[in-house]
Image: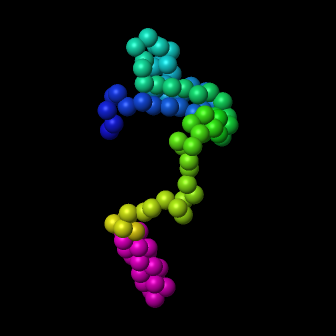
Amino acid sequence: MVPLTTPRVLFNMQCVGPFVRTVSDQEGNYRDVVCIGDCDTLVQELTEYLGDWCIVKPPEQIPIPKSLKLALKRKRTEKEMKRKRRKLN
C-alpha cells in the first residue's frame, strides 16, 4: 500500500473508480490528476512535454537485477522439468 499522499494519474476515456469521487471534490484534492482521452495520445503528449527528462528505454536496455535474473532462470528451469515429467508419464 502506498501512502495517501502519493500522486495518482488516470489516463482513460472516462473518469472511473476512486477518481470519480475524488475529482468531483476538487477542493482539497492535491494529488489526483485525470487525463480524459485516448491513452496513447495523452502519454505521447506527456512525454513530449517532459522532453529529454523522460527518455523511455527499450526493454532490452533496462538493467535487470542479478537476483531477478536468477529467480526467472530458476522458474523457467522448474517449468521445463515439469514438462519433461509430463512427457515421460
- Up-down: is 85 above or below 34? below
Q: Is residue 65 left or right of residue 60?
A: left
Q: Please, which residue is most extreme toward the front here?
A: 52
Quadrant the N terminus occupies: top left
**Can residue 75 be seen in this snapshot?**
no
**Main secondary structure found in the magenta portion:** helix
* Residue 83 place in picture, x, y as percent: 47, 79
**Residue name at image x 38 percent, y 63 percent:** 65
Q: Which residues are magenta?
A: 70-89
Q: How is the image coloured?
A: rainbow
Q: Residue 23's x, y, as percent?
A: 49, 19
Q: Tell me if residue 79 is in the magenta stretch.
A: yes
Find the residue positioned furthest to the top. 27
Eyeballing the image, is 53 above or below 6? below
Q: Is residue 70 above or below residue 39?
A: below
Query: Foreground residue, 71 or 60?
Result: 60
Q: Position of residue 25 (x, y in %)?
A: 46, 13
Give the residue drawn at x 54%, y 26%.
34
Query: Any magenta on residue 78?
Result: yes
Q: In the shown orientation, is residue 33 left or right of residue 85?
A: right
Q: Residue at x 62, y 27 (%)?
A: 36
Nearer to us in this view, 64 or 24: 64
- The C terminus sits in image quarter: bottom left
Q: Position of residue 69 (x, y in %)?
A: 40, 68
- Can you see residue 30? yes
Image label count: 0
Name the image quarter holding residue 50.
top right
